Amino acid sequence: MLKIQPPGVIVALLLSLCVPIHAQADWGERLRGALPGNNGAQAPASGQEAGLRDLLGTSSDHAVSMAGQQGGFLDNPGIRIPLPGILKDAQGLLSRLGLSQQLDDLETAINAAAERAAPAARPILAEAVRDLRFEDVQPILGAADGATRHLQDRQGERVTQALLPETRHALQETGATQALSSLIDRIGTRLPGISALQDFDLDTYVNDQTVAGLFDLMAEREGMIREDPMGQGGQMLRGLFGR
């Protein structure tokens, strides 16, 4: 016996014939969720994931733009990268030894390197967002920075490793690597413990701080979008957060 499909399904099938071939695969996915006997819950979940990816894409673009400008790290107390380890702890003493300017120059060079490296994170973050999986979206939707922290938890190490070569190069360009070496030489044996900085991995330290700063900026932007999804994001994000 010929089975009569519901009118809505027939219309959807006819519309699928009017779109280019390369778009029909997407229509097929949509129709599988609409046909009787299929799990209708798949479509809302897919929509939520698309909204979260859009949210992360918007947030990451904003973070990279903010961090990658001159003063993006240095002039932002929330993500400014401090002097590493014992140098920060002994900053007061070292300043009294006449090394205040050298310390300031090193901190400036470190943050300038982070600002130079930040733009290279844009495609890295975009790829990480594309490959991110959402097993359960409800906890992510419930937290003010849930999407960002989910990305950081699942893809943070990947982003960090991918950005490291760019950060290393930026530290050379800004003179931070040379500044640290020169500072250690000037201190010499006057301050116990400074010799340990000879083996300090400045590249990894600054790179970790750079990535952490980018995620913090993303989290901040995500919170703003959640508060005003239409003004800060767009129609998809408005639907995601029910505004």
Image (tube, grey):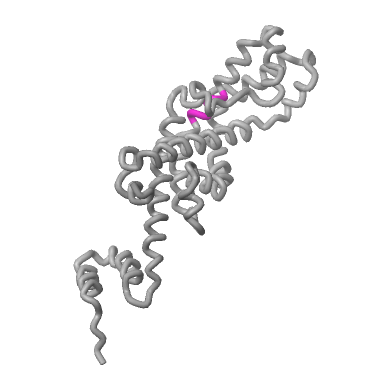
Q: What stretch is highlighted in magenta?
A: 110-116
For residue 236, above or below residue 85: below
Residue 210 relative to residue 42: left or right: right
Q: How many labels does the image show?
A: 0
Q: Which of 193 and 32 lies nearest the eye of the viewer?
A: 32
Q: Is residue 207 above or below residue 187?
A: below
User: Residue 179's spot in the image, x, y percent?
Assistant: 62, 19
Give residue 83's quadrant in the image: top right
111 falls in the magenta region: yes
Q: Which of 147 and 87 is in front in this view?
A: 147
**In front of the other: 93 or 205:** 93
Residue 173 vertical position relative to residue 235 in the rendered view, above or below: above
Q: Position of residue 108 (x, y in %)?
A: 55, 19
Pick the quarter of the image with the N terminus.
Answer: bottom left
Farthest residue, direction bottom = 1
Going by the image, does 100 lie left or right of 117? right
Q: Where is residue 224 in the image (x, y as percent from the top left)?
A: 41, 37
Q: Which sits in the foreground, 227 or 27?
A: 227
x and y percentages locating residue 200 in the rendered image: 70, 30
* Residue plotted at (62% across, 25% down): 177
Report the side of 100 relative to 218 (left or right). right
What residue do we see at 49% from left, 21% from top?
75
Which residue corresponds to the image point at 38% horizontal and 60% vertical from the top-left? Answer: 44
Q: Residue at x 72, y 12 (%)?
A: 93
| Magenta stretch: helix, strand or loop mostly | helix
Asked if the magenta segment contains residue 207, the reply would be no
